[in-house]
Amino acid sequence: MFLNLFFPNLIFLASIHALGIYNAGMTQIPTFSQLLKQAIENRLLELHTAMVGRIERYDAVTQTADIQPVLKNSVKSEPLPLLCDIPVLFPRAGDFFISLPLKKGDFVQVLFNELSIDEFFTESPPVIDCSERFTLQGAVAFPGLFSQTKALKSAHKDNLVLGKEQGVQVHITQDTIKLGSEDAREALAIASKVRSELEYIKSKFNTHSHTGPMGPVKPSDAILSKEDIATKNVVAS
């Protein structure tokens, strides 16, 4: 199987060697080992493992992107073709996920699977083609890759941080969750305890009395219960 990957190149180069065909620029006929090395190198030019890509279009509905590899082939000195409808992989398990609002110009790390993932991606019956491995058809993209000049300014050496650069953030330390920023200091009230205190104040107010000229006086307007003001989307234990 290994020879099948570069056998056509090897046959061609071996024929040149056997017939003694070479151009005027050659000073000597290459040896068989040189031909073998060149055949392997030619085949490796068609194998892809990982590279940096730039998003040209992102579809948030399908989580796919058109991605332009940013590095040129050093041998052919030409850019690789635009990779279309590449799956963007976000952390996901079960019904839980983390997604990012990707946009044109963002960079991603593009990885190439050993085999094409078209059948898996479309839930079609899998077909294994042993002659095509590590090609551009097996690409997937991981967001988050940027140059050193665009390193995160809000990355923290100790805290887990969720948020926007120079914007609202959630910092999780060993024993505290800070909402808004790392500098958050104002404690959040627990709704059940706040309601308990308010009920206590209401009870005291509604039942208290004081002595007036004509005897005990009670408040004319009792404090009534209002609607539940506790937030339902941010909770604490």
Image (cartoon, rainbow, N blue to C red):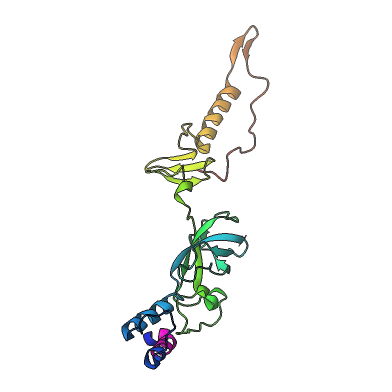
Residue under the image location 50 percent in, 42 percent down: 169
- The quarter in which the N terminus is drawn is bottom left
- The quarter holding residue 217 reads top right
Q: In this view, does 192 lie to the left or right of 215?
A: left
Foreground pick, 144 / 134: 134
Residue 236 in view: no
Q: In this view, does 33 lie to the left or right of 82?
A: left
Residue 114 placement (x, y as % from top left): 44, 76
Residue 93 placement (x, y as % from top left): 48, 63
Q: Does the segment drawn in magenta span residue 119? A: no
Foreground pick, 154 / 43: 43
Residue under the image location 51 percent in, 73 percent down: 136
- The quarter in which the C terminus is drawn is top left
Residue 141 placement (x, y as % from top left): 51, 64
Please tell me whether residue 54 is drawn above or below residue 113 in the rendered image: above
Extreme bottom residue here? 19
Residue under the image location 52 percent in, 57 percent down: 107
Q: Does the segment drawn in magenta span residue 10? A: yes
- The quarter holding residue 231 reads top right
Residue 236 placement (x, y as % from top left): 48, 42
Q: In this view, does 120 lie to the left or right of 24?
A: right
Residue under the image location 38 percent in, 41 percent down: 175
Foreground pick, 6 / 67: 6
Please tell me whether residue 206 is drawn above or below residue 236 in the rendered image: above
- The quarter holding residue 84 reads bottom right
Please tell me whether residue 24 is drawn above or below residue 168 in the rendered image: below
Q: What stretch is highlighted in magenta?
A: 6-14
Please tell me whether residue 21 is drawn above or below residue 62 in the rendered image: below
- Determine the main secondary structure of the stretch shown in magenta: helix
